[in-house]
């Protein structure tokens, strides 16, 4: 039977348990701890943020009954077939490098993480939480609940300091931004998302402990802990890539960042300044236009709309400018095709999309992999929800390689030094957890 914090049962059967809880944080802690015994795990946490399109406060998928590992070439078609075969919950990730399957592009920068380009699994156990109502689905689900309840509440453990090295020193970064701006002056592109990597070799960390402390320090609506055997994705993303709710597609690109201030009055001034910053608004509207164009490939004619433009949302470290673009999905476009039609997300590429991706491959020094990709789920009712993998630590436990990518939008009038500082602000929570 559940402990006091779990309230009372609503329904119980061999493969399904429904009940209410009074303390979601205790349940989350115990359930995540239980789930890490599996080789494959996807933990999606909204951290109590709510929006009109969120269906769950928490999803935990543990263990893989069936798996799909695919690399660039035929990955989307393989996923389409896998989805047709398994009309149930699917959890997984798309890496940024799937761009090479969609367009005539390539990725030749070094990769030290070695994830497949696409990975999806059918979970053995599925736990969902919404408004303190919990469902556990899987073999002997009441036994799973008992196992979760047995978990001890652990206190935060100290994390050894990890010094991440930059692939670009500051001078190199500034010089590269100026080269990108030369392309803008020539008319090759209008805006690009230029990314840099911070990394460490030979590092031994406890990925679960790092994620728990990151999620506490920087709770965001699209946080994720994804365990793929010896690979770990520790994600504190504030951004939704694409969701499907019924026949509606929703994309919420972020462009525009301002650092939070400790003083309340100063913080409000910074927030208002972001709202009215012409450079940030210009970046945002260019990406909104790109997303609108991407959605037309899946939309019923005349249904693509900008539901919100230049919305300002506040998180622990930063204020963000977020816009919402929606459309009605055409009947002849599958869920997988809708994702492919918008991938990679415009906020992580630039515009025009193909030219920007080509140039960033030329100027960046490491393969993005799952960074700039997406993590999320397909549900049995054919809805889906995927984040943008940003503000994320990637850890290969086998070769002890730790990676953190950050990027920012480069426009004609971008200040290279400020863009560098913006990258450090975006990385600040990850740096802090690692003792920087």
Image: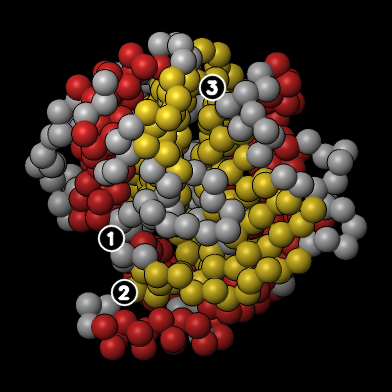
| 263 w.r.t. 215: above or below | below
Q: Quadrant of residue 86?
A: top right
Disc on res. 260: 2
Color encoding of the figure: secondary structure
Mark toward the viewer: 2 or 1: 2
Circle nearer the N terminus (2, 3): 3
Q: Is residue 365 above or below residue 413?
A: above
Q: Is residue 352 visible?
A: no
Residue drawn where x is 37% and y is 51% of the image = 47
Q: CA distance from mark 2 to mark 1?
A: 11 Å
> Which residue in the structure is indicated by mark 3?
121
Residue in the foreground of this view, choosing between 323 and 25: 25
Q: Secondary structure at mark 1?
A: helix
Residue 78 lies in what quarter of the image?
Answer: top right
Percent x, y of residue 295: 76, 54
Observer able to see residue 280: yes
Where residue 243 appears, as percent x and y from the top left, is: 63, 48
**Residue ID at (63%, 74%):** 309
The quarter of the rendered structure image containing the C terminus is bottom left
Classify the position of the N terminus by image quarter.
Answer: top left
Q: What's the distance in space between the residues labelled 1 and 3, CA to CA? A: 32 Å
Looking at this view, name the residue that lies furthest to the right: 301
**Which residue sits at x=74%, y=62%?**
292
Answer left or right for 359 relative to 64.
Answer: right
Q: Which residue is mark 1?
A: 428
């Amino acid at each position: 039977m559940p402990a006091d914090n779990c309230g009372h049962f609503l329904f119980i059967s061999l493969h399904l348990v429904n009940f209410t809880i009074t303390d979601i944080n205790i349940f989350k802690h115990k359930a995540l701890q239980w789930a890490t015994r599996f080789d494959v795990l996807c933990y999606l946490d909204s951290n109590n943020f709510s929006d009109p399109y969120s269906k769950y406060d928490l999803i935990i998928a543990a263990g893989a009954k069936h798996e799909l590992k695919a690399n660039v070439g035929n990955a989307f078609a393989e996923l389409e077939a896998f989805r047709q075969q398994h009309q149930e919950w699917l959890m997984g990730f798309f890496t940024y490098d799937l761009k090479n399957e969609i367009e005539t592009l390539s990725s030749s920068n070094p990769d030290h993480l070695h994830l497949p380009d696409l990975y999806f699994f059918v979970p053995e156990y599925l736990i969902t939480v919404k408004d303190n109502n919990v469902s556990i689905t899987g073999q002997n689900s009441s036994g799973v609940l008992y196992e979760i309840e047995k978990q001890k509440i652990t206190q935060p453990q100290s994390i050894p300091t990890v010094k991440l090295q930059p692939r670009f020193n500051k001078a190199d970064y500034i010089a590269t931004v100026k080269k990108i701006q030369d392309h803008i002056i020539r008319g090759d592109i209008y805006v690009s998302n230029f990314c840099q990597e911070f990394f460490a070799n030979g590092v031994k960390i406890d990925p679960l402990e790092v994620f728990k402390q990151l999620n506490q320090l920087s709770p965001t609506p699209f946080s994720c802990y994804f365990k793929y055997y010896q690979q770990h994705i520790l994600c504190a993303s504030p951004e939704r890539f694409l969701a499907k709710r019924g026949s509606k597609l929703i994309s919420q690109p972020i462009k525009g960042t301002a650092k939070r201030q400790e003083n309340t009055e100063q913080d409000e001034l910074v927030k208002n300044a972001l709202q009215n910053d012409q450079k940030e608004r210009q970046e945002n509207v260019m990406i909104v236009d790109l997303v609108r164009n991407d959605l037309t490939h899946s939309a019923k004619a005349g249904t693509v709309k900008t539901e919100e433009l230049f919305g300002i949302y506040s998180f622990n470290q930063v204020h963000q400018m977020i816009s919402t673009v929606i459309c009605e999905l055409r009947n002849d476009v599958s869920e997988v095709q809708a994702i492919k039609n918008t991938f990679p997300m415009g906020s992580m590429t630039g515009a025009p999309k193909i030219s920007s991706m080509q140039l960033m491959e030329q100027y960046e020094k490491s393969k993005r992999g799952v960074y700039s990709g997406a993590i999320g789920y397909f549900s049995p009712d054919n809805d889906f929800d995927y984040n943008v993998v940003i503000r994320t630590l990637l850890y290969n436990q086998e070769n002890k390689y730790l990676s953190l990518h950050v990027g920012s939008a480069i426009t004609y009038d971008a200040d290279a030094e400020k863009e560098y500082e913006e990258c450090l602000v975006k990385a600040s929570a990850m740096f802090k957890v690692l003792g920087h």
